[in-house]
Image: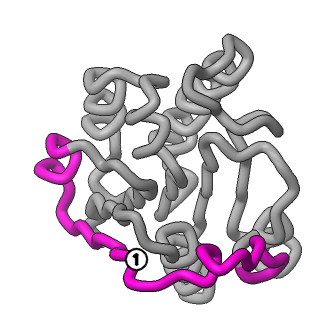
């Protein structure tokens, strides 16, 4: 089966959720999935996915602190290590689907250069489906992708003061 590059971007809710849904569908079809989460380093419900789907592996490449304006050296180091780990997973031959969650935000914040990400895209074996999520997908990435979905916020209860809820947003 030929793999493609998918990008889920935009300011609306649901990018990670869509990627997780695709991952579960793939796992149920017997495919092996790797999910690497950039900028995330706190316990979220999806970290337990391997307990339910042994053919899905997940790793976080962030720190517990949010990136505020300028990333710390620790955050940059963790992201760079994560990109290298994700590249190894991508080319390993072990996975049919690789999800790089919040990679677009990491690119936007300057964690990675265009060249670094293009090298990653070029290293992707033809059979691997690569899913990239996050706001601020750069135009060059959109052009390189085979499928791009933009999530658009129309209305969100967060603006009425509803905090993120366990099992729904995290």
| Colour convention | one colour
Question: Helix or strand or loop: what does disc 1 sit on?
Answer: loop
- Nearest the eye: 75 or 81: 75
Is residue 161 found inside the magenta-colored segment of the image?
A: yes
Outermost left residue: 143
> Measuring 61% from the left and 88% from the top, which residue is drawn there?
28
User: For residue 153, which quarter of the picture?
Assistant: bottom left
Q: Is residue 93 above or below residue 131?
A: above
Report crowding for label 1: few under 14, some 14 to 19, many 20 or more residues within 10 A (C-alpha): few
* Residue pointed to by mark 1: 153
Horizontally, residue 88 falls left or right of residue 142, namely right
Q: Residue at x 40, y 34 (%)?
A: 107
Looking at the rendering, which quadrant does residue 150 occupy?
bottom left
User: Which residue is rendered at x = 30% and y = 49% of the image?
Assistant: 137
Q: x%, y% of residue 113? A: 34, 21
Q: Residue at x 24, y 43 (%)?
A: 138
Residue furthest out toward the front: 160
Between 159 and 86, the one nearer to me in the picture:
159
**Residue 27 seen in this snapshot:** no
* Magenta segment: 139-168
Residue 110 located within the stretch drawn in magenta: no
Picture layout, residue 112 above or below residue 127: above
Q: Position of residue 97 (x, y in %)?
A: 48, 63
In which quadrant will I find the C terminus?
A: bottom right
Side (left or right) of 164 relative to 132: right
Q: Taking the image as drawn, is residue 77 in sight?
A: yes
Residue 106 lies, in percent from the top left, at 48, 36
């Amino acid at each position: 089966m030929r793999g493609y590059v998918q990008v889920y971007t935009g300011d609306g809710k649901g990018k990670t959720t869509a990627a997780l849904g695709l991952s579960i569908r793939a796992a149920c079809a017997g495919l092996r999935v790797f999910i690497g989460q950039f900028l995330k380093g706190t316990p979220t419900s999806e970290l337990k996915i391997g307990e339910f789907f042994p053919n899905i592996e997940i790793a976080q490449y962030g720190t517990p602190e949010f990136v505020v304006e300028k990333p710390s050296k620790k955050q940059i180091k963790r992201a760079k290590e994560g990109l290298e780990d994700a590249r190894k997973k991508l080319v390993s031959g072990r996975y049919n689907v690789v999800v790089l969650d919040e990679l677009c935000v990491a690119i936007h914040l300057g964690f990675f250069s265009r060249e670094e990400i293009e090298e990653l895209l070029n290293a992707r074996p033809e059979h691997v489906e690569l899913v990239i999520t996050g706001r601020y997908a750069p135009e060059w990435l959109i052009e390189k992708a085979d499928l791009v979905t933009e999530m658009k916020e129309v209305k969100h209860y967060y603006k009425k003061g509803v905090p993120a809820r366990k099992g729904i947003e995290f």
